Amino acid sequence: MKIYVSMDSAAKAVGADEVAAAIETAARTKGIDVQIVRNGSRGMIWLEPLVEVETEAGRVGFGNVTPGDAGALLDGALPDLGLVEDIPFFARQTRLTFARCGRTNPLSLDEYEAHGGLAGLRRALGMERPEMVEEMKASGLRGRGGAGFPTGIKWDTVSQAEADQKYIVCNADEGDSGTFADRMIMEGDPFCLIEGMVIAGLATGATKGFVYLRSEYPDAIKVMNEAVRIAQARGVLGGSVLGQGPAFDMEIRVGAGAYVCGEETSLLNSLEGKRGIVRAKPPLPALEGFMGKPTVVNNVLSLATVPVIFEKGAEHYASFGLGRSRGTMPIQLAGNIKHGGLYETAFGLPLGELVNDIGGGTASGLPVKAVQVGGPLGAYLPTDQFDTPFGYEEFDGQGALIGHAGVVVFDEGADMLKMARFAMEFCAVESCGKCTPCRIGAVRGMETIDRIGQGDASAVELLTDLCETMKEGSLCALGGFTPYPVMSALTHFPDDFPVAKEAAE
């Protein structure tokens, strides 16, 4: 028997290691020959630990398995979910970036290749640098870390820059609430990220890469370090890529734990061993980045999407999506939601369908009150905006942002005044202190919201003015985007701000 048990952190957190050990013990006791493969997660977090048994028809799934279920599983007496890829949550997805995640042993380069891995890199090795950059531009890929900046334009800037050394830096400082896609890809398909970084290096003339990985992800750190070692031993990395290309090597660097280091210039300062504070721009990192050299800074999902673009072609990737939002987005459903997990789909799906149909509504069973998209700096969207298609410009038109595509659901019990205060408190705690609007504004924001909660109607206008100052005057998105959750809570949920409602009337 070939049995798959996820080694993803989410699965391990609910007992996957113990389940794997119990299956192994039960197999020895029963004299059954079992091969246990520790794969990545399929992304159906509410079913973890998810165990898959390989059959002639395909892999059959068993959800929420406990160590006590091991014997019944081996005897064929445990109720199953049917074929894993027929489970509606999974079957309805369009998996491009996550095509291999959950299917393979994450640290088997042979399995990676057998499932299409390195095909994009081999195609890239036969292209000239300008061709590769044009391929990225034609794909329409935009930064998946939050800003949504066109990846091809960033690569083009670095490619054309004159320098004796260039760098590729992967931003793996995934700090937004409700997000886990970066971690999933690093733990479940690490060679995909490595391949994407190598292709980025070939396209721009960079020969060295760094993954800046948050310290809170010990499993991802371990897997990525081992994957880099394997890639070096097999010639994917090193003095000549696959023995036919220029040099490209990389290493993993672990951050000290600061939300602001998700901002690219703070990240670069930290990577250089300095305090993680925001740099003024210009100069842009694409021209003067790591150690003052031209640097591509891309998010994990952006770089992990590169291999499929080069494997299948830019036209294929760009055929998905809507408007200027091309391709697919791995959306993370979290918070008070029945079916939490990762759902990769083409841009354009209405928010309400994601929450109520795909996600199954709230886990509590109470009506949905609000959804925050884009992490702690994202706007709170009420149910009357649930027809908004999932796309960059479409969300912007609603005063919201996609960010890293974390979707956090709240039921009717949520107090939106408290949530607005939390946004200011989060900013105050995480501010690097470089600029006054963020450093001081967030503290004053907490005080002002407290005044509103105590019935001071005059504080409403002050809060609005403060948010405008933070939005326009902050050096980076931490202070600049904090007004999004605050003002959306104030605007869309007036019943939770009684004095604001009275002032409006």
Image (cartoon, grey):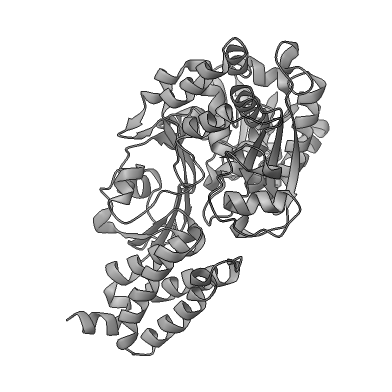
Give me the residue at 37% from left, 77% from top.
463
View extreme (front): residue:
162
Of the 4 image quadrants, the one containing the N terminus is top right
Q: Which of the pair 293/320 is nearer the observer?
A: 293
- Is residue 99 among what the camera can see? no
Q: Is residue 178 visible?
A: yes
Which is more toward the observer, 283 or 171? 283
Q: Residue at x 28, y 76 (%)?
A: 495
Vertical side of 157 occupied by 484: above or below: below
Specify whether 341 is left or right of 17.
left
Q: Is residue 419 left or right of residue 458?
A: right
In the rendered structure, the answer to whether residue 193 lies left or right of residue 378 reads right
**Quarter location, residue 251:** top right
Image position, residue 41 (x, y; %)? 60, 38
Q: Residue 198, percent across and down?
A: 66, 25
Please, is residue 336 above or below residue 115 in the view?
Answer: below
| 270 vs 17, nearest the viewer | 270
What x and y, as percent, mark residue 11? Answer: 64, 45
Residue 93's image quarter?
Answer: top left
Q: Position of residue 199 (x, y in %)?
A: 61, 23
Residue 150 position (above or below residue 455)? above
Check the image and name the residue furthest to the bottom.
455
